[in-house]
Image: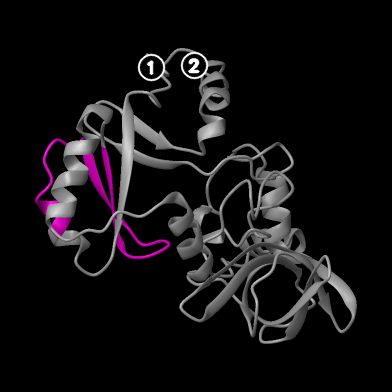
Amino acid sequence: MLTPKGRVTDHLKLVRTSDTVYADVEPSRAALLKQFFDERVFITRVEISDVSEELGLIEVFGPDSGEAVKAVEGSLAVVPLERPLPGAVIWAPRGYIEAISSALRSHGVAPSSAEDLEEVRVIEGSPRIGIDYGDHHLPQEAALEYLVHFAKGCYLGQEAVAMAQRGTVKRRLRHLHFEGEALTGRVLYENDEAGTATSAAKIVGLSRGIATIKTSVPIDARVTVVSDESRSDAVVKALPGTIDGPELPSARELRERLQGSKT
C-alpha cells in the first residue's frame, strides 16, 4: 500500500478463503488499516474486522516442513512460503495454536523465537517494513518491483511509481556481506556517506546486513559500516529474489508510437 506520493506504508500478505480475505500485517498497523478500509466501503457489501485476537500464525521453515504441515489439523489455511526460506505459514484460530505447535514438535519441528526469525530474515536478505523500508521509500527503492503490476490502471501513488520506473532511483535496498562483525549504522563508500544499514545478524559464521545504499555504489563494491566506535567492512550485493522490473516507455516514446500508429 502506498501514499499519494508512491511511498510504501504497508506490506499486506493476503489469503482468500471462500468468503473472506485475510491480511497479515505488522501488528502495530492492524487497527489503522481497519480504519483505512472502513472509510473506503461504499456500495460493496463488505465487512472489515480486526481479527488479531482471534487468529494466529505459525511459520514453518526447512526441507521437511511440507511433510510436517500435512499432519496438522485445525488450521484455517496453509500457505506456501518462499521468503525468508522455503516453508509454509499456518493460519489458525488461537484456540488451536498450542495443539498445532505440539503436533509440529512431534514431527521433529523445533520451536524458535521471534529473535531467531529476525536473524534468519537478515541472513537470507528479506527486508522488513518499518525497519528496513517504509513511508520514505518508493517500491523501486525498496526493491519491491516484483510486487508491482506496472500495467495496472489507476491506484494510489501510481504517478510517482511510474515516473521512477521510467528513470532510475538514487538509492536502493541492498544485502551486505560483512567480512567481520555485522553492524547497523552509517554506510561509507570511498570515505563518503553512501547510506544506512538498518538490520544486521550473524549465524554460524555468516555476517549479513540490509541497508539502503546509493545506486551509484556498484554491486560487489566494498563499503564500511560505522556504528559508534565500531567499524566493519562489507561487500554490497543485490537482495536475493529481487528484480529490476520492466522498463516503461517515456512520454516521448509514447507520443512517437501514437504518431506512428496514425500514419
Q: Which amino acid does label 1 sit on?
A: Val
In this view, 217 is above or below 45: below
Per the rendered image, the range of residues in magenta is 68-91
Is there any visible trace of residue 254 in the rendered image? Answer: no
- For the N terminus, the image quarter is top right
Q: Can residue 105 be seen in this view?
A: yes
Give the camera-side residue of 175 and 4.
175
Query: Which residue sits furthest right?
Result: 192
Say what secondary structure mark 2 lies in: loop
Residue 37 % position (x, y):
52, 22
Q: Position of residue 78 (x, y in %)?
A: 23, 46
The answer to which image quadrant residue 229 occupies is bottom right
Q: Residue at x 65, y 59 (%)?
A: 140
Image position of 5 (left or right of 11): right
Q: Which residue is depicted at the point 59% across and 75% down?
A: 238
Q: Residue at x 56, y 19 (%)?
A: 35
